[in-house]
Image: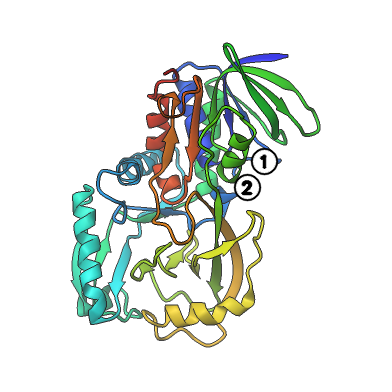
């Protein structure tokens, strides 16, 4: 039986960041990843957007960690030569009725510590992005995009240089609590049994499922899945910046993003699904996308939307419930010494990763 100080379950961007922080603090750390490589789920199926932190409730973990994490992420990307583009984004109101919501978002951003938004008239927005139609908007200059895979590679390199070990193709199939920690049994091609003093459950979609097998964990964590579909644009790119409409109940609206090569794609939308591997994009959704896009870009050509990819948000709330904060649980909340759970870490998780990792590394592992 192998003995280790700390096991991190899950090698998405959050698991990698947390494991890196622990290893850099001198903790012997192993990452167990069920898939054959790191970052193959939510971490590689998103918009690659560095969020400014304008939408989240003031005082929430999402607001704090997004704001702090964004600053850390730009600094880290620059220091590690990770490709990024601080291109900025336009947040637009397309009707007079949407203007109060636009101003409410700007005030929320101010209360959350985001002070660089620039108010734009319709003419000023049009001057920045001539293809955009709106009645007013805000420019968020600190929003950007990043090579998420490059970010994860850098995190992994730091982790391994600090003595950490990533083991892929190794799902945790059973685990239990013992007097001085945990016993974890893994599957895969080379099953093993580990004893660990501490466990960080950063398994993304699989995190609530893992807790279901831990009989002493109460109350159970609910789990829902919201698919985000993306369509790419065929033809020339109409924008140099990201363009966001007013948010919807469970998402930020069908927005326009650009990748590091300048290619434009639209999404994600919000489609509640039954399981976390429902990743096929239905071409028929293009009609709904087109209607949403033409509210701020009337010039979208017919037939220009091509199904691209989809990702799954690991929701811990039902469609009719308000969106909760990040759920970062230590022993003080669940009573199990040595266990920290990272639940419902959806957007702005990637932006928040470095700050979230510091937060976890500073938590107490005992009641």
* Residue 360 x/y as whole percent: 42, 29
Left or right? Give the position of 169 relative to 176: right
Q: CA distance from mark 2 to mark 1?
A: 7 Å
The residue located at (55%, 46%) in the rendering is: 149
Q: Please report the residue visible at 44 percent of the width from the left and 51 percent of the height from the top.
A: 347
Quadrant location, the C terminus: top left
Q: Label for residue 240?
A: none
Secondary structure, mark 2, is: loop
- The image shows residue 310 at horizontal and vertical percentages of 59, 62
* Residue 187 point in image, percent of width and height: 76, 32
For disc 1, the neighbor class at 10 Å (few under 14, some 14 to 19, many from 20) is some
Of residue 185 and residue 71, the one placed in the foreground of this image is: 185
- Which residue in the structure is indicated by mark 1? 37
Q: Is residue 98 above or below residue 353?
A: below
Residue closer to the observer: 60 or 209: 209
- Would you say 280 lies left or right of 290 here? right
Residue position marked by numbered label 2 in the rendering? 40
Vertical placement of residue 159 versus 246, above or below: above
Which residue shows up at 31% across the image and 81% down it? 133
Structural crowding at the residue carrying mark 2, measured as other residues with C-alpha within 10 Å and reported as few (<14), some (14–19) or many (≥20): some
Inspect this view and state whether residue 152 appears. yes
Task: Please give the name of the residue rendered at 61% of the width and 72% of the height, measured from the top-left corner.
Answer: 307
Q: Are marks 2 and 1 in contact (CB under 8 Å)?
A: yes
């Amino acid at each position: 039986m192998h003995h280790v100080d700390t096991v991190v379950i899950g090698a998405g961007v959050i698991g990698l960041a947390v494991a890196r922080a622990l290893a850099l603090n001198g903790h012997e750390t192993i990452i167990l990843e069920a898939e054959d490589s790191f970052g193959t789920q939510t971490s590689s199926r998103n918009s690659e957007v560095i969020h400014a932190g304008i939408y989240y409730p003031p005082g929430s973990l999402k607001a704090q960690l997004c704001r702090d994490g964004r600053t850390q992420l730009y600094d880290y990307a620059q220091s590690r030569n990770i490709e990024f583009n601080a291109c900025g984004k336009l947040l637009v109101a397309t009707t007079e009725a949407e203007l109060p919501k636009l101003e409410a978002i700007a005030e929320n951003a101010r209360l959350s510590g985001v002070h660089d938004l620039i108010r734009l008239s319709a003419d000023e927005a049009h001057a920045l992005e001539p293809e955009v139609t709106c009645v007013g908007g805000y420019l968020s200059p600190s929003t950007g995009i990043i090579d998420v895979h490059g970010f994860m590679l850098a995190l992994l390199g730091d982790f391994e240089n600090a003595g950490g070990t990533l083991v892929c193709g190794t799902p945790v199939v059973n685990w239990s609590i013992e007097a001085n920690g945990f016993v974890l049994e893994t599957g895969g091609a080379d099953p093993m049994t580990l004893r660990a003093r501490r466990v960080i459950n950063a398994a993304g979609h699989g995190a609530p499922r893992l807790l279901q097998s831990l009989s002493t964990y109460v109350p159970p964590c609910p789990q829902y899945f919201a698919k985000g579909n993306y369509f790419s644009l065929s033809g020339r790119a109409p924008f140099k910046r990201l363009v966001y409409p007013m948010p919807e109940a469970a998402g930020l609206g069908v927005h326009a993003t650009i990748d590091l090569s300048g290619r434009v794609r639209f999404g994600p939308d919000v489609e509640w699904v039954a399981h976390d591997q429902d990743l096929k994009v239905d071409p028929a959704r293009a009609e709904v996308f087109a209607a949403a896009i033409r509210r701020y870009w009337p010039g979208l050509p017919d037939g220009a939307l091509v199904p691209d990819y989809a990702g799954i948000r690991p929701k811990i709330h039902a469609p009719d419930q308000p969106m909760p904060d990040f759920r970062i649980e230590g022993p003080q909340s669940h009573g199990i010494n040595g266990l920290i759970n990272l639940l419902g870490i959806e957007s702005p998780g990637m932006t928040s990763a470095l700050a979230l990792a510091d937060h976890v590394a500073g938590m107490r592992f005992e009641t």
